[in-house]
Amino acid sequence: MNSEDVNVEDIYELSPAQEGMLFHTLYAPNSGIYVTQFEQPLDEVAHSVFEQCWQRIMDRHAVLRTSIHWEGLEKPLQVAHRRVELPLERHDWRGLTRAQQEQRLMAHLTNDRKRGFDPSQAPLMRLTLIRRGDDDYYLIWTYHHILLDGWSLSLLAEEAMTSYEAFRRGEDLELACLSFEDPPAKGLIGWRIATFQADGCWCISFSYWGAMGLPVQARRELALPSRTRGAHRQAGRNQASRCGLLRDSSGRRG
C-alpha cells in the first residue's frame, strides 16, 4: 500500500492480541500458524448466487476487507479497504474416485495452510469450492485468525447460509451491519486496548466485530469509552498520514 492508494475506508492500530499474531506470522512464514480452515459439505450449488452472496458479505463487513501494515511504521496498522474482490477458487474432482478425492483433499488442506497469507494484502481470506459429484460440493473457507475468532466465525457462517438461501429465492435481506463506523465496533477495539493497559494482561479474545452477538446492554457498555475509541482511531490515522499510507480522493494526505 502506498500514498497513491485511495481505496481506504478507515485505519486503526492493532489490539495487543492482533500484534502478537502478526509477530508470530512474520516470524514463521509458510508455517500455517494462525491460518484457520472452515470446512462444509454442500448440496447443489448455484454458482452465481454463491459468489454474489459471499461478495455481499465482504462488502458488508470491513473486517473482511482489512490488511495489516507495519514496515516503516511506529506501530502496525490495520487498514479497511473500500472494495476488495472475493477470492474464489473452483475445482472439479468428479473424475476421481472417493478415495482419490479424500487424498487430494488432505493434500490441498495442507498446502492451503502452508500458503498462508501476506498480511499486507487484503483480503486475508479465500474460498475454495470443490465439486465432488453432480450435487456434491465441499467448501473450504480459509482465513487468518487475526481477523476472526470462533464466535465471529459462527455468526458469519450463519449469515452466509441465510443470505445464500434468500438469494436463491430471489430475495434480498436487510441485515444489520457492524462496520468501523458503528459504536460497538469502535468501542470494542478501544475496550480491548484499555483493558490490556489497565490490567497489564490480555484475557479477552473477541474479534472487533463479534459484538454483533452481544446483548443490547453489553453493546452499550462497549460503546461507552468514546474518548479511548476516538484516540485509538485518530492515532492510527495520524501515523498513517505521517508515513504516507493515507491520502484522500483530492490528493491531499491526512
Image: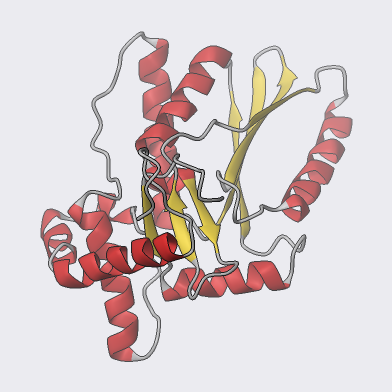
Q: Residue 234, image x and y in percent?
A: 28, 64
With 190 as the anchor, is 147 left or right in this view?
right
Quadrant of the rendered image containing residue 48 = top right
Quadrant of the rendered image containing residue 129 = top right
Quadrant of the rendered image containing residue 108 = top right
Q: Residue 65, image x and y in percent?
A: 47, 43
Residue 117 higher or lower than 34, as above or below: above
Residue at x 55% of width, y 50% of height: 2
With 88 as the anchor, is 202 left or right in this view?
left
Residue 58 higher or lower than 188, as above or below: above
Q: Residue 147, image x and y in percent?
A: 48, 55
With 183 as the anchor, is 139 left or right in this view?
right
Q: Residue 203, image x and y in percent?
A: 38, 79
**Between 65 and 5, the one nearer to me in the picture:** 5
Residue 194 higher or lower than 34, as above or below: below
**Between 221 and 76, the one nearer to me in the picture:** 76
Residue at x 16% of width, y 62% of height: 223
